[in-house]
Image: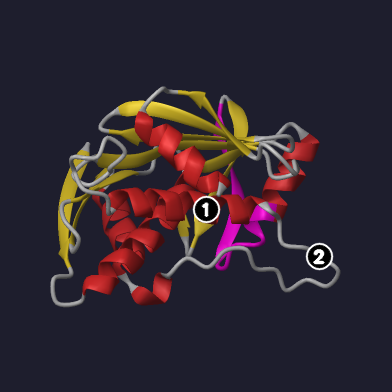
Amino acid sequence: MVIEEVRFDFEEFRLYADDFIYNLLKLMIISKMNSTFKDISSRQYFVNLIQQIDCCEAYVVRYGQPILYTKYRGMEFSDQKITSQFVRVDDHTIDVTMESVFEEFIKSFDSLASTTASRVNWGIDGRKDSNIDPFFKLLDSFVHAVHRLTLLDKNNADSLMGKRFGIKNIHITKQSIHLEFLVDGQVNILGLYPSKKKGKVETLFGNSSIASAIVSLMKQ
């Protein structure tokens, strides 16, 4: 296993730190999105979602049974490809840890995270008579909630400042999305329901104040 930690210091360009976290979170989300291939409705829903992410496509990986994952700007993601986490050390410093079996995956992910030209653009669709899926609105609210918590004082129980944050898994079906994230190694699972008018997000697993804070911010 290859492990690399990179420090990004934006002391002279404070706002760039926020932009970097927004893009990194989106990239981490894309890297862990998956769906079953055999269920036709879930497969079609997943493919439709991926079509609404710029420079992204769905592809199949066979782990005993076929699973759909994402290919973003030429990089094919799966459970085995790469894992990434970050710590916001202060308002302008972010430490990013990347783990992979192969060093080239780390280099590729690092490039996608740090290059302005690779900025993630989702919730787009140029096809006629098509609507942007509300799933992306939920994802945006999740990203903004996590970012806001990284700016809270470390003494606040809800703060993500100084804590290691990562995306573990995002399993997508036609009915719901299970989003698993880690805070200092502890697993939390949110249920996202894009088609529902009320109760679009709930905590399925984990009783941390941070998970509750994220859900509360997403519901605002």
Secondary element type, mark 1: helix
Q: Quadrant of the N terminus?
A: top left
Magenta stretch bounds: 49-63
Identify the amino acid type marked 1.
Ser
Image spot of residue 188 (x, y percent): 42, 28
Q: Residue 7 is drawn in which quadrant?
A: bottom left
Q: Does label 2 or label 1 sit earlier along the sequence?
A: 2
* Quadrant of residue 23 within the rendered picture: bottom left
Residue 141's tag is: 1
The residue at the point 29 percent across, 67 percent down is 114
Q: Is residue 156 magenta?
A: no
* Residue at the right extreme of this rendering: 129
The residue lying at 42 percent from left, 33 percent from top is: 211
**Residue that appears at 31% across and 45% down:** 84
Between residues 199 and 117, which one lies in front from this camera angle? 199
Q: Position of residue 21 (x, y in %)?
A: 33, 59
